[in-house]
Amino acid sequence: MMLSVAIPTYNREQPLRETLADVIKQDYPNFEVLVIDQTPTHEAATQVYLEELANAGKIRWFRVDWASLPGARNYAARRAIGDIILFIDDDVQLPDGFLAAHARNYLEKPEVGCVAGRVFDRMKLEDSGGNYEIEYLPPEAMDAGIAWYFIDLVHAVKPQEVLSARGCNMSFRKQIFTEFGLSFDERFAGSAVREESDFCLRLRSTNFKIWYDPKAHLVHLGEASGGCHDIGTRSIEYQVTFYHNHFLMGLKNLTALQCLRFFAKLFDCHVLGNPPCNKSRSSVKIITRFNFYILGFLSALNTLIQSLWNDGQIYSRQDKINNK
């Protein structure tokens, strides 16, 4: 079984180099590495390193002139030649046997269409004090209306079926893209939060399962700079797209009742700042977040209205036109 490891990257330098080094040294017998590079200009050390890897045939290096995480995932899926497409971030640390852990699930479980790997977030590990492990996620984690406040795969230590995967460590059978025609929704902007959740909810229509395997684990560094998008995290646009993406995921995939519960939890956690978000509860902060919440909702409605004549897959459409 061949694996295609897809790494979308934007404005990452040393973390990208270290991530690639970890991938290349994996002992899995049959895999390729696709780097979807959205960085306009690299540091000299990174440029030289990528050129050396590409010239040696160790990576397939694709440079694009736009920045979109779902767009980059789709770009990779159209070019991957493996039976399994494994998506990782450009700032992760991989243990030995990481690729084999993902592949094993597909060989042993034909009903599995997606493997969600365990993610050790560096900052969460530093803050946890070691008390971060549970065996199984609660039943609520399979309820699409409220699952997003129970799914925390850092904590689960037993294999189990789950509703969604973490975007920095997830793999799919290629037929999910080819036979069933699924693609990541490129209208998820900013940090593209919830783009993988949206994809996983739509994956349910294939009747394949999403299987969480704690042995397919990595460390996510969560670097402060760079990443998958070109919007500053403190900008108004970023804040609006954060809520836009949550509302868009809900309105696209959930029932009316599930939407009400999801949006209420979104308000309670991210606007009011209640646990597990634990944000500042100053009046000014709450009012500011409430304004972003409303703007995000209106923006998501506008996106859905536009979808009547525009599916929003601008990067995929551009790619297909260029490759005719």
Image: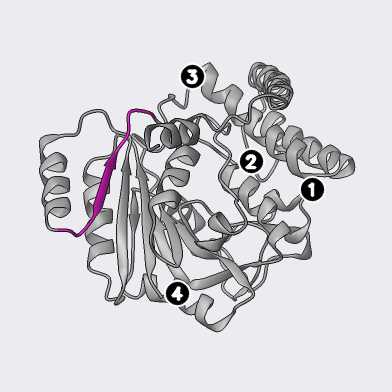
Q: Which residue is mark 2?
A: 277
Q: Which residue is mark 3?
A: 235
Give the Cα distance between marks 3 and 2.
Answer: 20 Å
Give the Cα distance between marks 2 and 4.
Answer: 34 Å
Q: Main secondary structure of the magenta part?
A: loop
Q: Nearer the viewer, residue 227 or 74?
A: 74
Q: Are marks 3 and 2 in contact (CB under 8 Å)?
A: no
Q: Is residue 253 left or right of residue 68?
A: right
State which tag comes first along the sequence, 2 or 4: 4
Q: Which of label 3 and label 1 is nearer to you? A: 1
Give the Cα distance between marks 1 and 4.
Answer: 30 Å
Q: Nearer the viewer, residue 280 or 88?
A: 88
- Based on the picture, tell me whether residue 297 belongs to the magenta stretch: no
Kind of residue indicated by mark 3 = Ser
Whole-percent x, y for residue 196 in the image: 57, 48
Kind of residue indicated by mark 2 = Cys
How many neighbours does mark 2 have within 10 angstroms: few (below 14), some (14-19), or many (20 or more)? some
For label 1, the SS is: loop
